[in-house]
Image (cartoon, coloured by chain):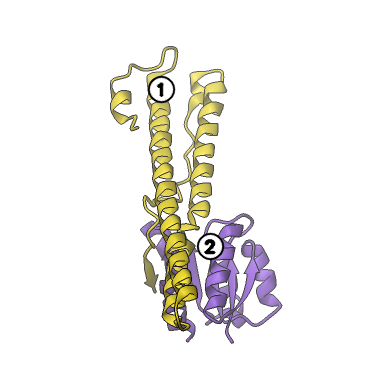
């Protein structure tokens, strides 16, 4: 679910300075967007893992059942395993995305816990290290 | 046989990189962050460094700078394999002396192709 449309019409949270409320709302929308992306990455990775696993298993079965050893079957099984290697990297991407979200939420909570509006000045958040929306392989550039 | 120093704080990424490189016939030394990589690189001959960017203690760009400051690693290929794809970060890697920038997730065949291009 995307929170952008719902958040746009909401009034500023009661008791909070408008700028602070808007900033807080911006962070929550970003969290929502990052969670959507995380779900997309996990779904993509699981789909690739499943097809890699099933593909490799099918070629190994073909190899076992064949009348003569067919190296081609093993090579095709390895190609399927390679897709699994790409998909398994989701753990690294997901944990970086979760850590970034955790830092964002912690900073929001810290600011809400402060006593006066003057203390509610935002501190810059480091850029999100994960921009990926799919588990397809990334780009390569040699300098 | 070429020896590659694979640096990543994520155990699952190190496992995937090591699996891919060993399968392609390379000898692999693993390090858990930039600092660990510096210590391991000092203790043996390394033909290529494949490093993550965001790591505790010392990141990939910091590691690249420190290695380039050492005459032993002046011309050793250093590839940064990271989730980061911003132009600013990539230029920082280039400025530090990296040989190339690879964005995760990597495709095993493409990774090996790039490594063969830089170390043979």
**Residue A109 point in image, percent of width and height:** 54, 27
Look at mark 1 in the image and give the residue it sits on.
A21
**Label 1 secondary element:** helix
Looking at the image, residue A4 sits to the left or right of residue A16; the answer is left
**Residue A12 point in image, percent of width and height:** 36, 17
**Residue A46 point in image, percent of width and height:** 44, 51
Q: CA distance from mark 1 to mark 2?
A: 37 Å
**Disc assigned to residue B60:** none
**Label 2 secondary element:** loop
Residue at the image point whose x is 56% and y is 22% from the top = A113
For residue A89, above or below residue B38: above
For residue B85, above or below residue B101: above
Residue at the image point whose x is 35% and y is 32% from the top = A1
| Dot 1 alpha-carbon crowd within 10 angstroms: few under 14, some 14 to 19, many 20 or more | some
For residue A14, above or below residue A26: above
Look at mark 2 in the image and give the residue it sits on.
B52
Q: How many marks?
A: 2
Viewer-nearest residue: A54 or A132? A54
Chain letter, colour yellow? A
Viewer-nearest residue: B74 or A134? A134
Tag 1 and tag 2 share a subunit: no
Residue at the image point whose x is 55% and y is 80% from the top = B74
Image quadrant holding the N terminus of chain B, namely: bottom right
Tell me which corner region of the image, top left, top right, bottom left or bottom right, holds residue A71. Answer: bottom left
Residue B114 showing in the rendered view: no
Residue A131 showing in the rendered view: yes
Label 1 or label 2, whichever lies nearer to me, is 2
Looking at the image, residue A92 sits to the left or right of residue A50; the answer is right
- Chain B's colour? purple
């Amino acid at each position: 679910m995307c929170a952008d449309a719902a958040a746009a019409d909401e009034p500023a949270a009661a008791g909070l300075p408008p700028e602070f409320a808007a900033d807080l709302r911006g962070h929550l929308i970003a969290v929502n967007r990052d969670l959507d992306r995380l779900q997309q990455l996990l779904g993509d990775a699981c789909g690739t893992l499943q097809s890699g696993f099933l593909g490799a298993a099918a070629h190994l079965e073909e190899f076992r059942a064949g009348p003569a050893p067919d190296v081609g079957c093993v090579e095709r099984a390895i190609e399927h395993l390679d897709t699994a290697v790409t998909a398994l990297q989701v753990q690294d991407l997901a944990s970086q995305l979760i850590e970034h979200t955790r830092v964002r939420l912690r900073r929001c909570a810290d600011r809400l816990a402060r006593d006066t509006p003057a203390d509610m000045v935002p501190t810059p958040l480091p850029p999100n290290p994960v921009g990926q929306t799919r588990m397809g392989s990334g780009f390569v550039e040699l300098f | 046989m070429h020896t590659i120093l694979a640096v990543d704080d994520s155990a699952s990424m190190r496992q995937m990189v090591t699996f891919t490189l060993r399968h392609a016939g390379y000898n692999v030394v693993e390090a858990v962050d930039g600092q660990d990589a510096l210590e391991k690189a000092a203790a043996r001959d390394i033909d290529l460094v494949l490093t993550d960017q965001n790591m505790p203690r010392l990141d990939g760009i910091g590691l690249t700078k420190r290695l380039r400051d050492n005459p032993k690693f002046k011309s050793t290929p250093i590839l940064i394999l990271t989730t980061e794809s911003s132009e600013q970060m990539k230029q920082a890697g280039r400025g530090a002396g990296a040989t190339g920038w690879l964005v995760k997730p990597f495709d095993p065949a493409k990774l090996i192709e790039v490594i063969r291009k830089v170390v043979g």
